[in-house]
Each structure stands twice: as C-alpha cells, then as structure tokens.
Amino acid sequence: MDFKRKSLVCVLALILNTNLVLAEDRKLLAASSKELVFMNIDGTNHEVIVQNDMYNIRSIAYHETRKYIYFTEYQSGNITRFHFPSDDYIMKVIVQQNSGHVVSGITVDYINDYLYWTNSNDSSDGKILRSNLDGSDITLILDFTSYGSLGVLEVDLINGWIYFINALNGSIYRCMVDGSDLQLYFSSWWIYDIAIDNQDQRIYFSTSHSVGSTTHDGSDLRTIPIEYRFWSGHNRIELSGDDIFYSDNYLMYRATKTILKQFGGDCEKYTAIKNEEKDQRTISLTWQIVRSTSDEYLDDKWYRIFSANGDQMPSHPPGIMHCGTIYPIWLNGIY
C-alpha cells in the first residue's frame, strides 16, 4: 500500500467548497496543538489560519453551509467558533466549561444546525450534549457514565445515529440522535477515531496498527495494516469522496477506498502453517517451567493451519495459561 506522507498534523477534518474561489476543489483543514492549517488534499499550499501559543487544540469541526469552524481546547474544555473564510477570524467562546471538564470530540449537524460534543470531567463520567450553533439551548442526549468515558463522536445524518468511542476500552458504541437505543457496535480493537461514509454506507475507523471499515450493521470487516510513526491517542481519520486521510501525531497519510476494498475478502491469500504440533502445555503461573508462545511478532496477514491435529480454531474459551500461551485465542461463533 502506498500512503503519501505529508505534513505534521494531529487532527483531520475535511472542508469542501469553502467559497466560490475553491468551489471546484476539495480542501483539507488540519489542526496541530497550536494552529489550524488549510491546505490542498495533496498536502501542498499550506495556509495557517489560526496560530496562538495559548491554544492547545483537541478537536475540530466544520459547518459546510454556514462556514463556521469549531474547536475545543485541552486545558479549558471550552468550545470556540469563528467564520471561515473571513478577513479577521474573530474568535468567540460559545460554550464555557466548568473547571475540570473536557471535550474529547465535537461534530456538526449541518442539516439541522446542531452542535454535538462529548463531555467528561476528572471523575471520568461521560455525557453527549447538543446545542444550537451559537452554544445556546444545551441539551443532554446521553449519560454514558455507567458504561465508561467518552472519546470522539460522529453523527450519521442520513440514518440518525450517533457513533462514539468508549475511551476506557476503545470500543465503538452508537445511539439514536435523541439518545435512545444504545448499542455496542464494534469492540475487536482499540479504536481511536471514526468517520462515516454515507456514500458506501460504511463506518471507517483507525487503530494503532490499521485503518478499517464495516457496514452500518457491523458486518463485512475490511482492514489495511499500517506501518507508521505512532504516538498513542492521536490517530485521526477523515474521508472525502474516494480518499481516506489518516494521521498520527507526526505524519499525515492519504489513500483511496479502492485499496481498502482490495483487502476485503482477502483471506483467500493466506500463508500456510503446516505440520505444527498441537500445543497442550499449561503455562506455570510462576513463569519458571516454560516460556509462553506469542503471536506478537507475526506479520499482519492471513494464516491457515494444516495439521493432523485439525485445522479449526476452538469455538469455546480454553482459559488462560493454556495452549502454550497466556491468553489463547478462540472463535466466538461457529464455522
């Protein structure tokens, strides 16, 4: 896979058709901790539109029709907005947070003119809140405190879902825009960011080692293994047309959905593991009898076992300290 490495960015958001001059071009808005940068989607023609050492930007959002940029800060947790493009970029704090509260994610409903964000405090509680675009009429949508803390969120404007990340375990949850019908959506890996693709009816996500997507019902999982410079907690993903943008705390990458589609159903291209002995060792809790086996150093790809002992995964949990390792894998389901 040929990802194109670009500039130093932490958070990505797409800006489409920002004004008449750019009506035919797609543009990218990228945020580092101290500045917001406007650029072409190939990473060229950088324009710093906000730069202030007093800021420590955590997340950003853009209203495509009313031309507002929203951003949140780590220290204060306040939500600030300004017009873009503009001649003066006058900043206005529209949501003033109480001490200790932070906003981990923010998104805009540009159809119904709402602002959604995830709110938490030092007690690790978590709430999804909604307001008008000017910060008025703040409404509690979901209290997630009993389940965990909250990370980023996205609103599916077509189907009426809010997708968000449980910051305690990296799983994806979703609920309706009124807070009803809370569901665990995806929990196979630790997810850092999500993006909604209404064009293909899929949800894209970023992990520490891959970019992936599933259908809206959580099926048809497709992933791309990623090799990049990684700093925990700053992986971001965004979509525009057939382009996927992905960043860590150091580099930004660009790929196409076509590449991800090539990884769908790719289990037919596997590496064979032949004639391996069945490992029935029980690992000593004192770590002094045998060394456990680990798949930590295996390459990220498909494997198929050919063995006289059988070629299927166990369909029930063997329990820890079995099969020659600490946490043996098993298939939660049937073949």
Image (cartoon, helix red, strand yellow):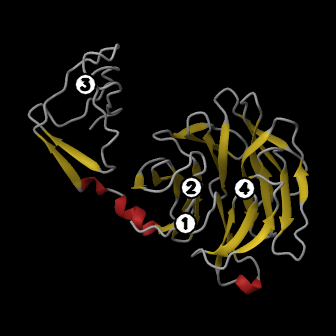
Residue nearer the viewer, 333 or 83: 83
Identify the residue under disc 2. 248
* Inter-mark Cα distance, 2 to 3: 36 Å
Q: In this view of the protein, can residue 283 be seen by the observer?
A: yes
Identify the residue under disc 3. 323
Q: Are marks 1 and 2 in contact (CB under 8 Å)?
A: no
Residue nearer the viewer, 135 or 286: 286
* Inter-mark Cα distance, 1 to 2: 25 Å
* Inter-mark Cα distance, 2 to 4: 13 Å
* Inter-mark Cα distance, 3 to 4: 46 Å
Above or below 300: residue 109 = below
Above or below 226: residue 87 = below
Look at label 2 and name its amino acid. Answer: Asp
Image check: 31 left or right of 138? left
**Which sits earlier in the primary sequence, circle 3 or circle 1?**
1
* Inter-mark Cα distance, 3 to 1: 44 Å
Identify the residue under disc 1. 199
**Which sits earlier in the primary sequence, circle 3 or circle 4?**
4
* Inter-mark Cα distance, 1 to 4: 31 Å
Depth check, mark 3 against mark 4: the one in front is: 4
Depth check, mark 2 against mark 3: the one in front is: 2
